[in-house]
Every structure is written in C-alpha cells, then in structure tokens.
Image: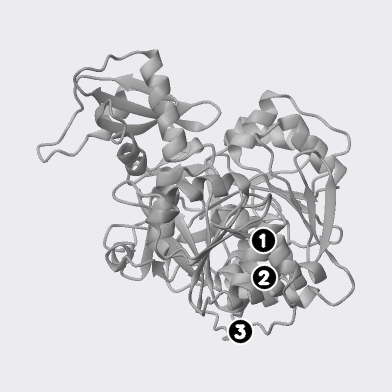
Amino acid sequence: MLTETSDYDQLYREFRWDIPARFNIATAACDRHADGSGRLALIYVDEDGATTRFSFDQMQSFSRRFANVLKADGLSRGDRVAVFLSQSVELPIVHLAAFRSGFVSVPLFTLFGEDALEFRLANSGAKAVVTDASGWAKLSRIRDRLPDLQHIYVTSATPGAAAKSFWPAIESASDDFATVDTSCDDPAIIIYTSGTTGNPKGALHAHRVLLGHLPNVEMVHGFFPKPNDVYWTPADWAWIGGLFDALFPAWYHGVPIVGHRAKKFEPQAAMQLMADHEVRNVFLPPTALKLMRQADVKHPGVHLRSMLTGGESLGAELLGWVRNTFGIDAHEIYGQTECNLVVGNNAKLFPIRPGSMGKATPGFDVRIVDESGKELPSGARGIVGVRQPNPCTMLGYWQNPEGTAKKFAGEFLLTGDLGVQDDDGYFWYVSREDDVITSAGYRIGPSEIEHTLLKHPAVANAAVVGVPDPIRTEAIKAWIVLRPGFEAGEALAREIQDFVKVQLAAHEYPRHVQFADSLPMTATGKVLRRELRALG
C-alpha cells in the first residue's frame, strides 16, 4: 500500500485507502499465491527442531478440505469456529477454512485454563473447535457446560469417540471448494480482549482488518516486503499481534513465515532459529528483547533487516542495545485489539525519540482527546483517540452493544490509554485510563483473575494490581483476604497461584501474593487499586 520514500510528511499526506467492496482474507493471504509453483508459505519447526516446509498451494488445499469437513458437519455461514492452538501448521489452516466459508474464527490462547475457555466458548457460541491433545484434555472437562459446541477436532493422538481426528478428516475430504463471496465488512474473527471490569470482551473484526494492518507493517518493516524477506515472531498466534502484525500480513505479501512454539522463550535458541532460517523481519516483544539483552546474545548468522516491537516503551538503553546487537533500529508500534497499529516508527522517515510511540500511521488520524471526543491542544494529556472510520476498527464487541457504545465518543474510538502528542507529532504514552496490567507483552484485566481467586475455598476477597518488574514491565500481584480457619503462609500462597494457573491461564497467575486483613474500598465497595499499587 505504501510508496517507498524518505519523506514521512509526504507519505502521510498523500496516502489513500483502497479497500475493495468484496474482500476475503483467505483469497488475499493464500489463494492468490497458490499458483501451482510451490511458493513457500510456512517453515514449521517443531519442538525437537525438525523442520517442515509448506507451500501456499498446500495451505490452499488443506484449508479447502477442512472447509468441506466443516460444511459436511453442518456448519453454516456466520457460525463461529474456535482455534485453540499455538503456532503450528494447523492453526492457519483452520482460520483460512473459516474465512473462505464465511464463518467467524475465534482464536484462543493455549495457556487458558478451564474458566477462561468456558467463558469465551460460551460467549461466542462456537459450534466447533480445533485443538491439540493438551487442549482436548481441558475441553473434555467443560464440554458438558457448552451446549453450542457440537464438534471438537484434535490434531494429535486419537481423541476417542467424543472428538474427531483433524488430519484423517482432512485427508478424506475434497479440496474442491468455492470460497464464498464476502464483503470487506463481513465478520471474520472475534479476538477477546481483557478489560478491568466485568468479563472479557470479544472484538469482532471484518475481513478488511487485514488491509487495515498493512500500512503500519509496511512502514515499520522498512517498506515491507523486500526480496528474500522471511518473517518470524515468538508472539503467540492467538492474539491480534501474532495474527495481524505477523502471520497474515506476511502471507498477504507472499512472504514465508517461520512457525515455532517453544515451551519458554530461550534467547540463544531464538538467535539460532533466526540464523538457521535466514529470518530478516521480526516482531519481538519488549520482554523478549530484555531477556536477550540479559543473556548477552550474539550469533554471526543473524542478519535482520527490520524489527517491530510494541506493548511498552523500550527506552534509550534497550534501543541502543538492539542497534549495537543487530545493526538495525527497533521500531515501536502502538495499537490495541479493537483498533490496532495506529502509531509507529521508522528511523529512515523520522528520528526515533526514545520513550515515544512514534507518529501516526499513514491512513490513521490519531489525536489526543477528552472523554467526549473533543480534541485537546498539543502537549495536553488526554485519551489517545482514533478518528473513524478506518478499516482496522472492530465492527463492535460481540453481543455487547453497551460496551461498544462506550468505546466511541464523537468521531473517535477511545483507546482508554492516556497520552500526549508533542509539537512535532510524536505520541507519548502516559498510563492506562483503567487498571489493565501490561505483563510480558500481554494486556491482562484484573477482574477475571479476581473472579478466579474468589473461587478458591480459602479466599474471602481479592484484588489484583500490576507492580513494576524489570523484565515483564509489570508483574501480577494479588492482595488476598482469607476466610476464617485459613492461615496465611508460603504454602497457601503457592496453592492459590497454582489454582489460578489451572483454572484461568498460566500467564495470568499472580507472581506475588500478599495476605491482608482488609482491602481499601470506596464508600460504594469498589476496591481502590491505586492505593494497593502505591503500597507496591
């Protein structure tokens, strides 16, 4: 979409969206590259290091076959298909099958526990879900509580009579499938995002969301694509960052992506992976960069061309380390699930200012506004707002018109982040307007964790806040009031932590537990989280 230049002002001023009325992500990100030439789409590296390469031709055939499987099993246009998988060959097959069928895909993070899974599957009304053996073990325990869920497909092992084997179903299906004719505004995907109050909200996006991500991806990655580009991110493909900052933009441009799900992020192993597969473009979250700096990583075979990062400010020291280690600049971005990649950096277009999120992405009118959507002057602190319409903005929160209405004011989508724009157009993050915790690149709502904590028999009341952490930016801390008969101590704290890991999600458990006799409250009974944060 972007014309290469060194003049940001001209690039921004002259940019125009070109969004076709009829558009389907499967056609744009797969079929137009599936020309019989065997063009490389995916380099998949399993946990043992074995590598398998898949072409766009194969991805087209697999996803058409699975679309026929879903059709034969009775799914119809508009039905939701959940994707409970980590980085794998099966994950994009399921999304592409859903897109080409006119279904709505629902990505789910593999670290989710039973509570988190049950809410999202029930709220979305998913009729089918694809998962692996470990995911099937979780789903089997909650399936009886999910009346809409009719079909579970398992990618590994033999699931037994209660579920179906994914690959045998694909192998026995035809790859003759006509992709449905979708509007650019037709629903394509629901991505759940955490807020501070109430349950998570499902951001419903249209097929156009892919096109909406392209200007920022192209700008931040130095006018992506270039010859020989190969993309990789350790960010999970269950979130908008992994899917639409990496996987589908890469495939839209016919660029192969490396897929690999490590049990944990290992800095030196990441360097070896990039060297082995000649990776040139990366999305590395700040936590990954901090771990790599801590490990003092080096590898003569790593030759990166571009780096996208985001979720928190890097600061001058980490920016300098990236430059010294990789010979390129880390380009920070800003966005959120509801409207992503609206601000970014490119050192060849304008100087990077450490601590700044960058400037507005071409195609996006980003302003600092008040709660009513009124624009504020340069230098004033206010809410980061994005003028509407634009193709990156969600259609709305799934089955939540009240929440959707609160997200908009006047002409603007309100991000809920407080920031400042300086006289030169740079945006500076100040804080969350609410209490969302940013930990290891994840945006985590305290409410869901608190609800899970209250299910533990020892917990009478609980409040969750983020506390400073040198690696994760923030770590989750739980303040807990115990029921009578329970004694505070390390053993109980560990038991409660493990309970949250199993029930909710492994990335949302409190790393710090503080027992208290009471919690600070307002007169109406609302926990004063700011007072708990002040206590540290």
In the structure shown, which secondary structural element does the residue marked by tag 2 occupy? helix
For discs 2 and 3, the disc positioned in front in the rendered view: 2
Hey, which quadrant is residue 314 in on the image?
Answer: top right
Q: Residue furthest left?
A: 523
In the structure shown, which secondary structural element does the residue marked by tag 3 occupy? loop
Q: Is residue 39 shown left or right of residue 248?
A: right
Residue 268 in the image: above or below residue 274:
above
Q: Few, some or many C-alpha atoms within 10 Å of disc 1 (few <14, some 14-19, many ≥20)?
A: many
Q: CA distance from mark 1 to mark 3?
A: 23 Å
Quarter the C terminus occupies: top left
* Front residue of this view, candidates 361 and 278: 278
The earlier-in-sequence mark between 2 and 3 is 2
Residue that mark 3 sits on: 180
Q: Position of residue 350 (x, y in %)?
A: 64, 53
Q: CA distance from mark 2 to mark 3?
A: 14 Å
Q: Is residue 252 shown left or right of residue 73?
A: right
Q: Position of residue 312 (x, y in %)?
A: 52, 41
Q: Position of residue 10 (x, y in %)?
A: 63, 68
Q: Few, some or many C-alpha atoms within 10 Å of disc 3 (few <14, some 14-19, many ≥20)?
A: some
For discs 1 and 3, the disc positioned in front in the rendered view: 1
Residue ID at (74%, 61%): 224
Residue 250 in the image: above or below residue 63:
above
Quarter the N terminus occupies: bottom right
Residue that mark 2 sits on: 66
Residue that mark 1 sits on: 166
Inspect the image, locate mark 2, and give the three-letter code of the amino acid beneath it: Phe
Answer yes or no: do the residues labelled 2 and 1 have beta carbons within 8 Å? yes
Q: Position of residue 332 (x, y in %)?
A: 60, 47
Inspect the image, locate mark 3, and give the three-letter code of the amino acid beneath it: Val
Hey, which quadrant is residue 160 in on the image?
Answer: bottom right
Inspect the image, locate mark 1, and give the three-letter code of the amino acid beneath it: Phe
